[in-house]
Image: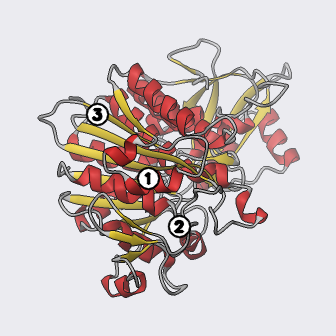
């Protein structure tokens, strides 16, 4: 993904950055050709809209961007989607669009996934000229990390199984000079990860746990855990075809956590980072785990299988218990976990659960600030009665069809005891339609919100 950012250019044309109320004043000061063009084309100064006009030679002569209220980086994405090729600079006398947000939105509009297209990208040549205070490097690194996460979600399961997901983690680790280890197949049983093994045992693509550590041991411990179900058939509780079509994205939580880890390491945040990815394929075969089976988890809690299609919380349970053993200051997991979360809040709002009000508030504030909002739901403890097992200690799917996202979060909370603060994100993992900077397809959900929260809490440079 090309960033298309330049420091200076003598031939850069001007984009006038305004709010909705500033359009009439701007228009009065434009050349008559520009005013006539805007009138003829019927441009309306709606928030997050843009237009350009020709000069006397017929080339693009200038442009206008009407910012949202509040301003979003996606305003710059919309701008790039409208402008023709060439080099552009922003004229923003009111300081509406921070330079770093403009850079981020501009870069993200350049994302596309064309790995399987016989005809590649169109080779557009758009450049944004920015000032030195635009924090270009950080925004390029962050955008690149998110693009990596999107690419992983977009890759079909025939090319992205547990081994390939592990390879992606190892590649990122190698780029940052650290070593990640993997625990594969029956070694999961030997090292006490029985739930990860049970979920992945039916596939001919062996399950695994990937463990990566980076940073100074003296810095605060921040541990990220991602659900990496590379394809989910539902197991013996088989999904219908209509529900299975998107299941390559069931590793979206791990893609987001890997993207976040990449961004943290690129920015060299002063944390001791750990990333755990539980990578499996939930398949159907003679040795698939069954409804009614009971497994002893890593933590010692016995889990009764109420539904094999509630597999994500099983692999997360072992991974969270493992992460919790070293008592991190912050423990965050992300997972494409429940349809109930989407019914409650739709595709755009990730559901946030947290056992620490301060951590929850920090994440929510960061999300609002960078136009990646989340919504917090309660860890309503009385609903634990809905996941009480009949044969085992706890049921993985719940006994009633109520509050599915909450009961899933309560299930996960059962495996977190020593971490100072824990947050769980129940995410969709895809954009259902195309919007500025966010094309339809895979998404590394909430990466920037979490990254900005950590920057705000711990600072920029180690």
Label 3 and label 1: CA atoms lie apart by 20 Å
Label 3 and label 2: CA atoms lie apart by 29 Å
Marking on residue 310 = 2
Q: Count neighbours of disc 3 (C-alpha within 10 A) and say few if under 14, some if 14 to 19, many if 20 or more.
A: some
Task: Give the image location of residue 15, x and y in percent.
Answer: 63, 33
**Residue at screen point 84% across, 41% down:** 36
Q: Residue furthest top?
A: 10
Residue receiving disc 3: 213
Q: Is residue 256 left or right of residue 152?
A: left
Q: Quadrant of the C terminus?
A: top left
Q: Sequence-wise, which precedes: disc 3 or disc 1?
A: 1
Q: Give residue 300's quadrant in the image.
A: bottom left
Which element type, helix, strand or loop, lies under badge 1? Answer: helix
Which element type, helix, strand or loop, lies under badge 2? Answer: loop
Residues at discs 3 and 2 in contact (Cβ within 8 Å): no
**Residue at screen point 63% across, 19% down:** 12
Residue receiving disc 1: 196
Q: In front of the other: label 3 or label 2?
A: 2
Marking on residue 384 = none
In the displayed structure, would residue 267 be above or below residue 77?
above
Q: Residue furthest left?
A: 218
Q: Quadrant of the N terminus?
A: top right
Task: Give the image location of residue 78, x and y in percent.
Answer: 66, 43
Q: Is residue 419 left or right of residue 381?
A: left
**Residue at screen point 81% across, 22% down:** 59
Say if residue 416 shows up in the picture.
yes
């Amino acid at each position: 993904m090309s960033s298309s950012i330049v420091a200076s250019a003598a031939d850069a044309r001007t984009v006038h950055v305004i709010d909705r109320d500033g359009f009439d004043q701007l228009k009065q000061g434009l050349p008559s050709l520009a005013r006539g063009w805007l009138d003829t084309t019927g441009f309306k100064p709606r928030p997050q809209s843009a237009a350009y006009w020709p000069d006397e030679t017929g080339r693009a002569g200038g442009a206008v961007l009407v910012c949202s209220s509040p301003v979003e980086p996606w305003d710059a994405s919309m701008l790039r989607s409208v402008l023709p090729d060439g080099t552009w600079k922003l004229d923003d006398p009111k300081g509406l669009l921070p330079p770093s947000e403009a850079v981020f939105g501009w870069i993200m509009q350049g994302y596309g996934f064309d790995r399987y297209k016989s005809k590649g990208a169109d080779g557009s040549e758009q450049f944004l000229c920015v000032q030195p205070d635009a924090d270009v490097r950080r925004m390029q690194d962050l955008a690149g990390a998110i693009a990596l996460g999107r690419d992983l979600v977009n890759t079909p399961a025939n090319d992205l199984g547990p081994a390939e997901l592990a390879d992606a983690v190892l590649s990122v680790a190698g780029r940052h000079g650290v070593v990640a280890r993997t625990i594969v197949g029956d070694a999961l049983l030997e090292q006490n990860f029985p739930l990860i093994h049970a979920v992945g045992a039916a596939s001919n693509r062996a399950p695994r746990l990937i463990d990566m550590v980076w940073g100074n041991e003296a810095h605060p411990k921040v541990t990220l855990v991602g659900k990496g179900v590379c394809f989910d058939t539902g197991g013996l509780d088989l999904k219908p075809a209509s529900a299975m079509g998107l299941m390559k994205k069931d590793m979206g939580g791990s893609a987001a956590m890997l993207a976040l880890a990449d961004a943290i390491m690129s920015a060299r945040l002063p944390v001791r980072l750990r990333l755990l990815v539980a990578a499996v394929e939930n398949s159907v075969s003679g040795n698939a785990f069954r409804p009614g089976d009971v497994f002893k988890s890593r933590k010692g809690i016995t889990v009764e299988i109420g539904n094999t299609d509630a597999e994500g919380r099983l692999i997360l349970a072992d991974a969270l218990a493992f992460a919790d053993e070293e008592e991190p200051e912050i423990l965050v997991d992300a997972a494409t976990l429940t349809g109930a979360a989407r019914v409650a809040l739709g595709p755009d709002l990730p559901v946030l659960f947290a056992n620490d009000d301060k951590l929850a508030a920090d994440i929510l504030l960061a999300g609002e600030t960078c136009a990646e909002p989340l919504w917090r739901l309660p860890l309503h403890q009385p609903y634990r009665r809905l996941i009480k097992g009949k044969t085992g200690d706890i049921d993985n799917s719940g006994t009633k069809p109520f509050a599915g996202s909450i009961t899933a979060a309560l299930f996960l909370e059962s495996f977190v005891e020593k971490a100072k603060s824990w947050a769980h994100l129940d995410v969709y993992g895809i954009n259902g339609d195309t919007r500025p900077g966010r094309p339809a397809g895979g998404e590394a959900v909430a990466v920037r919100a979490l990254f900005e929260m950590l920057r705000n809490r711990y600072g920029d440079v180690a």
